[in-house]
Amino acid sequence: MGVLDSLFGRDGKKFMKRKDSDAGEQGRALEELRSTMYNDLHTTEGAKRQQQRNCGPVVALTFNFMVAVGIIMANKLVMGTVGFNFPVALSLIHYAAAWFLMAILKCLSMLPASPPSKSTPFSSLFALGVVMSFSTGLANISLKHNSVGFYQMAKIAVTPTIVLAEFILFRKKVSTQKALALAVVSIGVAVATVTDLQFNFFGACVALAWILPSAVNKILWSNLQQSSNWTALALMWKTTPVTIFFLLALMPLLDPAGVLLFDWNFSNTFAILTSALFGFLLQWSGALALGATSATTHVVLGQFKTCVIMLGGYLFFNSDPGAISLCGAVAALCGMSVYTYLNLNRSHESTAVTKQLLPKQNLFPPSSPRPKDIIDNAKLDMKINVVSI
């Protein structure tokens, strides 16, 4: 202390107190960091902010697109090479594997927290689980009993169904420009993919019955995440048991007999479990995309995937879908580009309006140090370091 007094006089003790206060501030900063990391997973608001920060629209849509391409190849291997011709049972395995993986995350305290039960009625979660089971099961049955062209026609019909359902349920309107862009997309995809319309009566009934659950499924996933603090994984954790229950009920009605007599050797089981892993990733990425965008945008992404696969096969693998189909795919991509541009324009306008409505914030609130104080504190720290040396 004598050295401090000789160098700085009465200010020596103040310097030491300043150093102790700096250590206290560092401790408080570390405590705040630990609290923030805890809140990111164990509170609904923190988990929601983390999902929005890490999985924006571009990341979520890209993730969903890549996984969708992967599961197509995995399911082709399972249904074709392996010969597992039980579509509802395959969906059941997908959801059971997803629930098992989420249970592991739950045990490791890595599953995001769910909002309080009072914030979302159980009927909404139950309805989502039911429509999800029918949407997945009926889609696989439709693909089995109908030609690809008729299946694509049913998928195209989902877009206007979503627009109509959102208007009826939430009074959500689509602008004329967006409606025209979606019409171009639907017509282009129809021209590109609908080359044959072979179906039987049972297959046609299944395809028509699939349209409404598929539309409502996407709407509920998007609405629950955007209107509440639900994250994708938390919502999957709550609804997957309901989906598994109804898939168990649908399996004996829609699948052929003999699933237990299937040759469950190592290679077949490994291929089915790989498909199940892709199924979990597809469900998760689809939920992220629906939470970050909208039900209509998610359908447009699926149609974009179809056109890209067709054009990629023509450009890189010498497939020849025909000039009419190629023109339809190009027209659909043009419509998707216009739809994306309109969405981005609306997003920028909403951001600009929000900034205008927010009050101007003071860059240096009364409780925070001013630039001059920061410089003075830096000089003080330099003097302390000199003394300690």
Image (tube, rainbow, N blue to C red):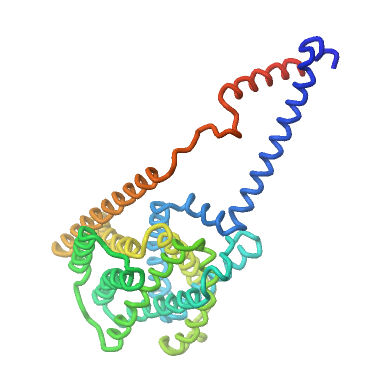
Quadrant in which the N terminus is drawn = top right
Q: Position of residue 327 (x, y in %)?
A: 16, 60
Q: Position of residue 174 (x, y in %)?
A: 26, 63
Residue drawn at x 46%, y 85% as measured from the top left: 251
> Does residue 293 lie above or below 32 as drawn?
below
Q: In the displayed structure, would residue 175 be above or below residue 128? A: above
Foreground of the two, 38 or 326:
38
In the image, taking residue 181 as reference, residue 82 lies left or right, namely right
Residue positioned most to the left: 323
The quadrant where residue 22 appears: top right
Which residue is rendered at x = 60% and y = 58% of the image? 43
Question: From the viewer's perspective, is 76 left or right of 106?
Answer: left
Image coords of residue 293 (percent x, y): 38, 58
Q: Residue furthest top?
A: 6
Measuring 42% from the left and 77% from the top, which residue is drawn there?
Answer: 131
Count the labels in the image. 0
Q: Is residue 88 above or below residue 58?
A: below
Left or right side of 209 for 229: right
Above or below, comparing residue 211 to residue 302 in the picture: below
- Nearer to us in this view, 270 or 209: 209
Res 2 visible: yes
Is any part of residue 90 visible from this angle? no
Residue ranking furthest to the right: 2
Answer with the quarter of the image where residue 100 lies. bottom right
Which residue is painted at 18% across and 59% down in the image? 331
Is residue 104 found left or right of 315 in the rendered image?
right
Q: Nearer the viewer, residue 110 or 9?
A: 9
Quarter that holds the C terminus: top right
Across and down, in percent, residue 306 comes to: 29, 63
* Image quadrant where residue 298 sits: bottom left
